[in-house]
Amino acid sequence: MIYLDYNATTPLCDEARGAMLPYLERHFGNPSSVHAAGRDARAAVDEARDNLARLLHVKPHEIIFTNGGTESCNLAVLGLARCLPAGALAKAGRSSRGGHIISNRAEHHAVLNAAEHLEKHEGFEVTWLNVSRDGIIDLDQLAAALRPDTRLVSIMTANNETGVIQPMREVSQICRERGALLHSDMVQSFGKIETDLSLVDAASFAAHKFYGPKGAGFLFLRSGLSIQPIMFGGAHENERRPGTENVPAIAGMAAAAEWTSRDREEEQQRETKLHDELWTRISQNVPDAKQNGANAPRLANTLNISLLGVDSETLLIALDLEGVCASSGSACMVGSVVASHVLLAMGLPIERARSAVRFSLGKWTTAEEIKATGDAVQKIVERLQTRKSAYAVA
C-alpha cells in the first residue's frame, strides 16, 4: 500500500506510542482524583501541557486540551464570538447574542459550520471574505470588513485540501490595528511550517495530523481572554472545557509534537522534492492535469490536482485498486466524494472541482512510491480515455 493521505491522518510515531503506554496500562487513574493514582495521571497532563507550551513559546495555562481539531475550532469560534469584546463597556466573560465575525468560504467545515450556526441561530452577522483563484484571501476586503462590533476573525493558516498558506503576518497586523481578535485553524500547518503564536489570539491543533493519536487536540488561548465553554459538566481545564482528560492521548500528543518538530525544515525540503517529482511525472504524462493553488505559497507535502475529464470518485477507486491511498479533499465528509467547497470558493469551474484529487505526503513517503504513483495515474487516465474513445465509436 502506498499511503499519500497524510493530511487526513498520520501514522502513530514510536515516540507517541511509548509515551502513551504507561497510561494505558499501569497509570490509569483519573487526573481529577486526589489519591496517588490520580496524582500520577495529573502529573502526566501537566507535563504534556508544560512541554507543549515550551515548544510553542507560550504559557502552560494558555493551552486548553480538547478531543481534536474540530472541537478546538468550535470552542474558539463559538466561545470567543459569544463573549463581548474587552473594553470599558464589557464585563469579562459576559455573553450576549449577536455581533459580527469574519471568515472565508475556503475554511474547514469546523469553522464554516460553527460560523454558519452563529449566523442562522444566534443573530450574528458573518462577512465571508473572497479568496483568489489560488486560494489567498483578499487583505483589502478584510480591512474594509472590520467594524467596531467585530468579535472575531477566523482564518486558517494552511488549507487542508490545497495546502495554500495564508499571509498570516499581514492578517495579524490588520486585526491588531483594528482591535479584532484573530483565531487560526493551524491543524494542517503545525509541524510543517513555523508556528508563530504571537500573531494570533487563539489557534487550533489536532494530534493525529502530526503523528500523534486520534482523539486529542488543544486550543491555544492568549492570556487575559475570556471564552464561553461550549460544553458543561465540570471544572476541568480551568472551567473552559469540561470532561476527564484523555491522559494517554495527551501524553502521546506532546511526544509527537516534539518529535515532528525536531527535523521539520529538513523534512520539508525532502517532501518538496518528492512533491515536485510527482507533479512533474503527472504533468508530463497527463496533458489535461491542472495544479490547484499553483501560484500561492503552499505546504511542501500537499499536491492538489484536477485531471480534466476524469471525475474524482472514479480516479480514487482506480488508485485504490492500484494500491494508492489518496483523497478528493477533506476527510471529514464521511466517505463522500463531492465537489470541493474549497475549489469552488476559489472560483474554479465545477468540472475542475469534480475532477480534483489530493496527494499528501509524509515522513514515510519514498521516492519509489512517488514513481509508482505517477505511473499509476498515467495508467489509469490512459485506460479511461481508451474506454471513452471506444464508447464514442460505438
Image (spheres, grey):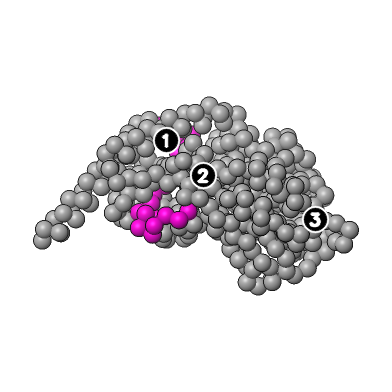
Which quadrant is the C terminus positioned in?
A: bottom left
First of labels 3, 2 by sequence position: 2
Q: Identify the residue at horizontal 48%, vertical 53% (top origin).
A: 346
Q: Residues within 10 Å of mark 2 (few under 14, many from 20)?
A: many
Please tell me whether mark 3 or mark 2 is closer to you in this view: 2
- In this rendered view, identify the residue nearer to me: 255 or 19: 255
First of labels 2, 1 by sequence position: 2
Q: Residues within 10 Å of mark 1 (few under 14, many from 20)?
A: many
Is residue 280 toward the left or the right of residue 24 in the image? left
Q: Residues within 10 Å of mark 3 (few under 14, many from 20)?
A: many
Task: Find the magenta span and give its range.
Answer: 346-366
Q: Identify the residue at horizontal 58%, vertical 36% (top origin).
A: 193
Q: Is residue 351 magenta?
A: yes
Q: Position of residue 244 (x, y in %)?
A: 71, 55
Q: Which residue is mark 2?
A: 164
Give the quadrant of residue 15: top right
User: Spatial distance from mark 2 to mark 1, Cα to Cα?
Assistant: 14 Å
User: Is residue 388 positioned above or below 164 on the image?
Assistant: below
Q: Position of residue 245 (x, y in %)?
A: 70, 52
Please tell me whether mark 2 or mark 1 is closer to you in this view: 2
- In this rendered view, identify the residue nearer to me: 168 or 24: 168
Q: Which residue is mark 1?
A: 275
